[in-house]
Image: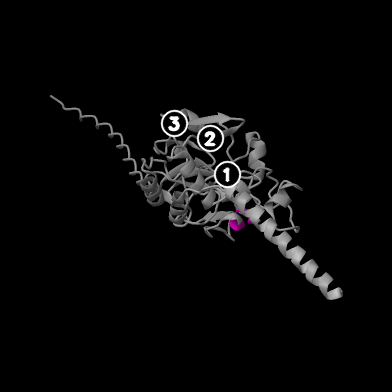
Amino acid sequence: METNFFLLAVLVLGVTGAVFAVVLYFVAQKFKVEEDPLIDKIAEVLPGANCGGCGKAGCRAMAEAFVKQGDMEGLSCPAGGPAVAAKVAELLGCAAGDAAPKVAVVRCNGSCANAPAKNRYDGLQSCAFAASLYTGESACSFGCLGLGDCVRSCSFNGITIDPETGLPNINYDICVGCGGCVKSCPRNVLELRNRGVKDRRVYVACRNTEKGGVARKACSAACIGCGKCEKECPFGAIKVENNLAYIDFNLCKSCRKCEQACPTGAIHAVNFPPRPARAPEAAAPAPAAPAAPAPNQEA
């Protein structure tokens, strides 16, 4: 009797399982989503870093966005650069576009020399955590905290903290402009800017919006909002708002006049050749000695 009950239970479970398997098969066929094979091809072309620089959840999501849109308008892979863009465009059968490559820059002059520590932080080594507690060791509430959130966020190992300055050091041979470090910085010290012709860039390395005297108490190389750079720029690329100058890299022509005009050295010009040394001014000729009077001649 017990054996018959056991066999019946097994039979019922087997039939039930078979029925559910058939039902699930037909449901799967009914709601099956056909995926474009082009997505796989584009995903193979993308670098696979999943850095998020494109604004998508990862390279697979970016491939899906390319295929769904059908072109590259407004979409780019900063980690792949022009080479990957050309391959994706070829697969999509469209133009690659001409998006300017970007890199991250450090908009802070608060080195150990320019902004000496006024206190010591001995808490969790996280910029995000420290920023929620206090202004920073230099007492500048706008400056880099130097605790390495940007280093840990870089998928390409392109950032280190310089032990001498305490500021991030970006390796531009590695930086692809993905923006991961920019998103990780609680002080918005890092910014994506055009890489520039010949890898040359001009920018204001300061985020402090306090008045000049207050800003310089925390950092001797802070922007003081004096406006000299704005007046000097012949291209209208510089605006001073809230006591802080900002250079629009789309308008800047890299003439570097602003760099010379800045009294605090807050403006950085990267990868430019050294300026030619000024020729010494010629000494003014000494005034001629008055002529001696002619001796009296007697007739």
User: Disc 2 to disc 3, how far (Cα)?
Assistant: 12 Å
Image vertical order of residue 55 relative to residue 5, above or below = above
Is residue 27 found left or right of 245 in the rendered image?
right
Q: Position of residue 165 (x, y in %)?
A: 58, 56
Residue 2 placement: quadrant: bottom right
Q: Which element is circle 2 on?
A: strand
Q: Which mark is residue 233?
A: 3
Mark seen at residue 139 = none
The amino acid type of the residue labelled 3 equals Cys
Give the side of residue 214 with respect to residue 80, left or right.
right
In the rendered structure, which disc, 2 or 1, sits on the residue that comes first in sequence? 1
Residue type marked 1: Ala
Q: Which of marks 2 and 1 is in front?
A: 2
Question: Secondary structure under badge 1?
Answer: loop
Q: Which of 121 and 10 is in front in this view?
A: 10
Q: Measured from the top left, where is residue 268 in percent x and y? A: 49, 44
- Name the mark nearer the viewer: 2 or 3: 2
Label 2 or label 3, whichever comes before in sequence order? 3
The three-letter code of the residue at mark 2 reads Tyr
Q: Where does the image place residue 287, in percent across and percent down from the top left?
A: 30, 34
Q: Mark 1 points at which residue?
A: 221
Q: Quadrant of the N terminus?
A: bottom right
Q: Mark 2 points at which residue?
A: 246
Q: Do the residues labelled 2 and 3 touch (CB within 8 Å)?
A: no
Neighbourhood count class around disc 1 (C-alpha, 10 Å): few under 14, some 14–19, many 20 upward: many
Q: Which of marks 1 and 3 is in front?
A: 3
* Alpha-carbon span between mark 2 and mark 1: 15 Å
Q: Residue 234 or 153: which is nearer the viewer?
A: 153
Which comes before the other along the chain, label 1 or label 3?
1
Residue 243 figure quarter: top right
Q: Residue furthest right?
A: 1
Residue interval drawn in magenta? 148-152
